[in-house]
């Protein structure tokens, strides 16, 4: 039986193999992720998430799509059927920071016992409502408070902060992402 | 029984009342949304979403938190237990565009029958892996293809494109959001 080294639930042999493969052939690093959302009513919609492209091929490991609903709370004229889009954005950031730290810490031999990311973000509704064009519709500020336990010293704890710069969602929020939108009759 | 006007599932009387209240007292426009994520293993984590602040008070309409998992597919060393963080970001964008168009179209008297937002986005894994510091970890480009049917003419169809600028998640991606992160021992 082969000996595998797993830290933070991350198989380091596979992580090294993936990294080596991408170094040898950078075209393998190209990923395309997707989401297909159908509006239902008001602020309620449903997204199917299944296929993606990565490591040179179309992924086929998900037999069924994930289904994720979004809705608004009553104060925003919804029915609380699901979190709203802004909350999913914060979830995406928290989950991304969590995974990024777990993977990169593992690669550095830092074993974590627990990791919690508490995120909050400010929105001024006047931006969405179009009442004041100097107020952005989106988040004005997002704060993340991470607490963690594990087998690390204070120097390594500080290192974990730097690892968050590898987070794809953090980068997508702190630096502009070009978003192109087309609309057509269905 | 009062007569209510509902377009696209949006109660226009309540939308007008909310807008009027915010105009009269802009402090009501301040919202704070939240997410609390616990890392489980590898790329698997779980987020609780429940309370938020808005319209001058702490919301108490959600008796239980929403629970949302994230994971990675096998090619990214996960177990396909849930969508990954990048896919949730695309879901957040799609759901936000969907709701934004539905609400703002309703306010303009444009009735929609259907609305679909198909989103895809490109990531170069070398950014996440730290193999090339000139490559960003986040999305390099996101494309949204919206198809819609309803009671609108071509001029109004073009107007729907402009309405997407009111989307909080679109704004949060296309313009930088300050994200502050602290890490402490738990």
Image (spheres, coloured by chain):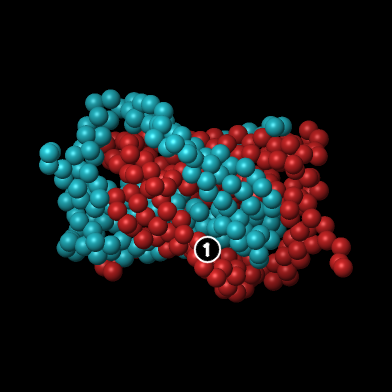
Chain colours: A red, B cyan
Residues packed near mark 1 inside 10 Å, few (<14), some (14 to 19) or many (20 plus) = many
Residue B107 shown left or right of residue A169 in the figure: left
Which image quarter is the N terminus of chain A in?
A: bottom right
Which image quarter is the C terminus of chain A in?
A: bottom left
Q: Quadrant of residue B74?
A: bottom right
Name the foreground residue: A78 vs B123.
Answer: A78
Can residue A127 be seen?
A: no
Residue B10 shown left or right of residue A164 in the figure: left
Which residue is at a point 46% across and 59% down the rendered structure image? Answer: A67
Residue A48: image location, x then y, percent: 45, 62
Which residue is at a point 78% across and 51% down the rendered structure image? Answer: A7
Q: Mark 1 lies on which chain?
A: A
Residue A24: image location, x then y, percent: 73, 70
> Is residue A58 depicted above or below B94 in this figure?
below
Residue B72 shown left or right of residue A17 in the figure: left
Residue A174: image location, x then y, percent: 53, 44
Which residue is at a point 24% across and 53% down the rendered structure image? Answer: B8
Residue B79 shown left or right of residue A149 in the figure: left
> Is residue A130 depicted above or below B163 in this figure?
above
Residue B59: image location, x then y, percent: 40, 31
Which residue is at a point 36% across and 26% down the rendered structure image? Answer: B56
Q: Name the residue under label 1.
A: A33
Determine whether the residue tagged by mark 1 lies in a helix, strand or loop.
strand
């Amino acid at each position: 039986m082969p000996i595998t080294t797993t830290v933070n639930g991350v198989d380091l042999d596979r992580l090294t193999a993936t990294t080596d493969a991408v170094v040898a052939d950078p075209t393998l690093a190209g990923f395309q992720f997707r989401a297909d959302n159908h509006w239902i009513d008001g602020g309620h919609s449903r997204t199917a998430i299944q296929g993606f492209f990565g490591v040179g091929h179309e992924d086929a490991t998900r037999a069924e799509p994930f289904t994720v609903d979004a809705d608004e709370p009553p104060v925003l004229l919804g029915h609380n059927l699901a979190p709203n889009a802004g909350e999913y954005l914060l979830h995406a950031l928290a989950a991304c920071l969590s995974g990024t730290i777990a993977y990169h810490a593992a690669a550095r031999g830092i074993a974590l016992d627990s990791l919690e990311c508490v995120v909050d973000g400010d929105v001024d509704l006047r931006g969405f409502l179009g009442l004041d064009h100097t107020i952005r519709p989106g988040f004005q500020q997002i704060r993340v408070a991470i607490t963690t336990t594990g087998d690390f010293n204070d120097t390594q704890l500080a290192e974990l902060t730097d690892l968050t710069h590898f987070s794809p969602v953090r980068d997508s929020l702190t630096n502009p992402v070009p978003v192109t939108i087309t609309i057509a009759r269905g």
